[in-house]
Image: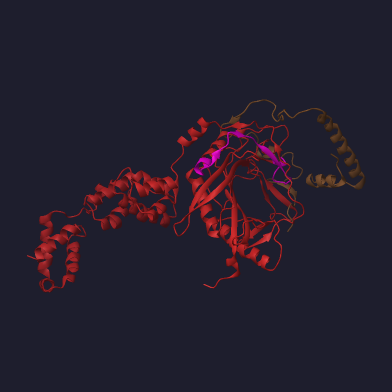
């Protein structure tokens, strides 16, 4: 599989990133190198191997429906780049 | 009726309903899921999407999913996994929503709706899956910024996806009413569309009658009442047909409902198809739903409207209309159901609940829970009528209002106190009847010459003399007896 500039554009859009032409070329090269690296795996026959998703074989790790408030309002807003006394503030995200 | 171009087309509708679950805590974290708190006070590192946090599923969200699945006649999936649905939006701090993408907990179900002509329509349920809600964005409060409240972030949802089985706007209305009634009976969601705890997106398309292929579907959002869902569908049906008639192409797009003028408008520009890049959520271990667990949930299911209707009509001999009225609201239905274990006069019990009790709820704008009289007291009242202690009209007009004023007193004591007990002593009654007849010799003569209509006058006078306490049956018997002697 080879990545082309269209794929870079599409991924950049999905990730909400912008690249100038020079950086785009560099991203293209990087991404293709990642893929080549991962293609090494194709040398192995994994037809019989289940994909590994979980780090252990547990299931039904559930919690009781009980409220435990672990942080307060101030702590919640503490790391926000922009905020007021109540809300997180972000650039307007709807075009009207 | 004149046939129009619209008659040549068929409407096809499928609904996606999001039900916000009324759990105490959130789907994957322990912060409160309650509605209406001050902004950003019910959050946690998990719901805020901080790195290094580990979600853990709320066991009640799972139970509610199984409950709803059983109520909607679904198969319940044994092996459940979660996935990440990736998209960027400010009210989704993790950058993904946790959802059951490939393994919905419930699938292949159905819900019956009753059309206005009494015919039943079966609407298929494709799937019901567990997921989490996003936060709330406010765009109109400030000139430059959007304000974000993350209290709702992580609140558990069940998304109920129907088959495209609805063919009229009315059927969509009825289906949604049915869904709301079910989640309320199950007590898993308050079903309030105005506040957004029940939300509905409609997938709407049209096709020429007789066509086997579906048309291109349009998704309509932002309808905050069941009535508005019906209105939006009515509008889309005509809009899409108008477009086709003009030779225009319908695109698959998302539109929003404008409640003011009953129309829809395009919401997203068709820049690029959504690409959510789903992948398995490795932070949540799979959930296995064993048969024993399903049976356990099934054994604790409350009675559902369809079961109650069946019981009310088959066992209690009520007609279907009465059964529908009684089961419309869960609390009213449960009250009536309780009442039927205390009296066997089911028809009378139904009349009391549908009449005076429901009138009280409406007049006071209260819920059934606030009704001051227990089912035991209503049963006692019915017994007094059945035994002839008080007449039906005295019970309705005097005793029932007195009971409402004085909910602790027994109906019998109140009836005695207020002197409402019917006069059933034959000698006493005969005295009253004779006195009335003696006062109207000319009317008695009229009666004897064939004018039976004056009987009402005598009856009214006896009631007056006894302050309404004369047993009407006995009085009319006595009148007949004395007049014909």
Question: Is residue B38 toward the left or the right of residue A80 in the image?
Answer: left
Q: Residue at x 27, y 54 (%)?
A: B395
Q: In which quadrant of the rendered view does residue A69 lie?
A: top right
Q: Say whether residue B302 is magenta.
A: no
Where A37 falls versus B419 (above or below)?
above
Q: How is the image coloured?
A: by chain
Q: Position of residue A31 (x, y in %)?
A: 86, 38
Q: Residue at x 52, y 53 (%)?
A: B175
Chain letter, colour brown: A
- Left or right: B38 in relation to B425: right
Q: Position of residue B482 (x, y in %)?
A: 9, 63
Residue B288, by quadrant, is: top right
Q: Which residues are magenta?
A: B68-96
- Whether residue B260 is visible here, answered yes or no, is no
Whether residue B76 is in magenta: the answer is: yes
Q: Colour of chain B?
A: red
Extreme right residue here? A22
- Residue A53 visible at all: yes
Q: Please give the name of the residue rendered at 33% of the width and 42% of the height, measured from the top-left corner.
A: B341
The vertical placement of A38 against B435, above or below, is above
Observer-nearest of B477 and B399: B477
Left or right of residue B130: residue B471 = left
Residue B291: percent from left, percent from top: 52, 31
Does B461 sit above or below residue B54? below
Residue B119 spot, x, y in % from top left:
46, 56
């Amino acid at each position: 599989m080879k990545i082309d500039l269209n794929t870079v554009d599409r991924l950049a859009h999905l990730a909400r990133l912008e690249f100038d032409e020079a950086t785009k070329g560099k991203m293209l090269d990087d991404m293709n190198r990642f893929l080549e690296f991962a293609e090494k795996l194709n040398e192995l026959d994994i037809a019989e191997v289940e994909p590994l998703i979980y780090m252990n074989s547990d299931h039904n790790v559930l919690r009781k429906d009980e409220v435990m408030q672990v942080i307060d309002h101030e702590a919640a807003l503490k790391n926000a780049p922009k905020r007021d006394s109540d809300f997180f503030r972000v650039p307007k995200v709807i075009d009207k | 009726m004149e046939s129009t171009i619209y008659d040549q087309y068929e409407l096809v509708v499928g609904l996606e309903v999001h039900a916000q679950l009324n759990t105490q805590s959130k789907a994957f974290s322990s912060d409160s899921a309650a509605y209406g708190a001050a902004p950003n006070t019910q959050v946690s590192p998990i719901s805020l999407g901080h790195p290094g946090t580990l979600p853990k599923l709320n066991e009640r969200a799972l139970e509610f999913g199984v409950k709803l699945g059983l109520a909607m006649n679904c198969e319940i999936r044994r092996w459940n996994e979660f996935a990440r649905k990736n998209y960027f939006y400010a009210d989704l701090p993790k950058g993904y929503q946790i959802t059951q993408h490939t393994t919905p907990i419930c699938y292949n179900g159905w819900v019956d709706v009753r059309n206005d002509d009494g015919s039943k329509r079966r609407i298929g349920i494709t799937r019901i899956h567990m997921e989490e809600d996003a936060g709330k964005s406010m765009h109109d409060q400030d000139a430059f910024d959007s304000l974000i409240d993350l209290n709702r972030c992580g609140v558990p949802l069940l998304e109920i996806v129907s088959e495209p089985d609805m063919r009229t706007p009315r059927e969509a209305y009825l289906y949604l009413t049915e869904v709301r009634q079910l989640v309320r009976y199950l007590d898993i969601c308050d079903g309030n569309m105005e506040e957004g705890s029940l939300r509905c997106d409609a997938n709407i398309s049209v096709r020429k009658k007789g066509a086997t292929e579906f048309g291109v579907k349009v998704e309509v959002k932002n309808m905050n009442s069941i009535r508005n869902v019906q209105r939006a569908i009515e509008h889309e049906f005509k809009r899409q047909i108008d477009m086709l008639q003009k030779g225009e192409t319908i695109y698959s797009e998302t539109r929003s409902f404008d409640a003011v003028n009953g129309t829809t408008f395009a919401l997203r520009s068709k820049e690029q198809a959504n690409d959510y890049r789903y992948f398995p959520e490795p932070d949540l271990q799979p959930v296995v739903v064993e048969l024993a667990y399903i049976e356990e949930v099934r054994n604790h299911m409350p009675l559902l409207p369809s079961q109650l209707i069946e019981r009310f009509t088959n066992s209690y001999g009520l007609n279907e209309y009465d059964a529908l009225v009684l089961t419309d609201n869960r609390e009213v239905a449960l009250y009536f159901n309780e009442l039927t274990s205390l009296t066997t006069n089911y028809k009378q019990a139904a009349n009391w609940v549908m009449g005076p009790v429901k009138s009280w709820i409406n007049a006071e704008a209260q819920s059934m829970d606030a009704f001051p009289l227990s089912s035991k007291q209503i049963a006692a009242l019915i017994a007094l009528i059945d035994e002839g202690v008080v007449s039906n009209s005295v019970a309705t007009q005097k005793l029932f209002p007195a009971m409402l004023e004085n909910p602790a007193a027994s109906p019998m004591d109140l009836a005695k106190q207020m002197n409402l007990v019917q006069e059933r002593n034959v000698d006493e009654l005969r005295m009253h009847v004779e006195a009335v007849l003696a006062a109207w010799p000319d009317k008695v003569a009229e009666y004897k010459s064939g004018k039976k209509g004056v009987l009402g006058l005598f009856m009214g006078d006896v009631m007056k003399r006894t302050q309404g306490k004369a047993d009407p049956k006995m009085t009319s018997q006595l009148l007949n007896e004395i007049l014909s002697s």
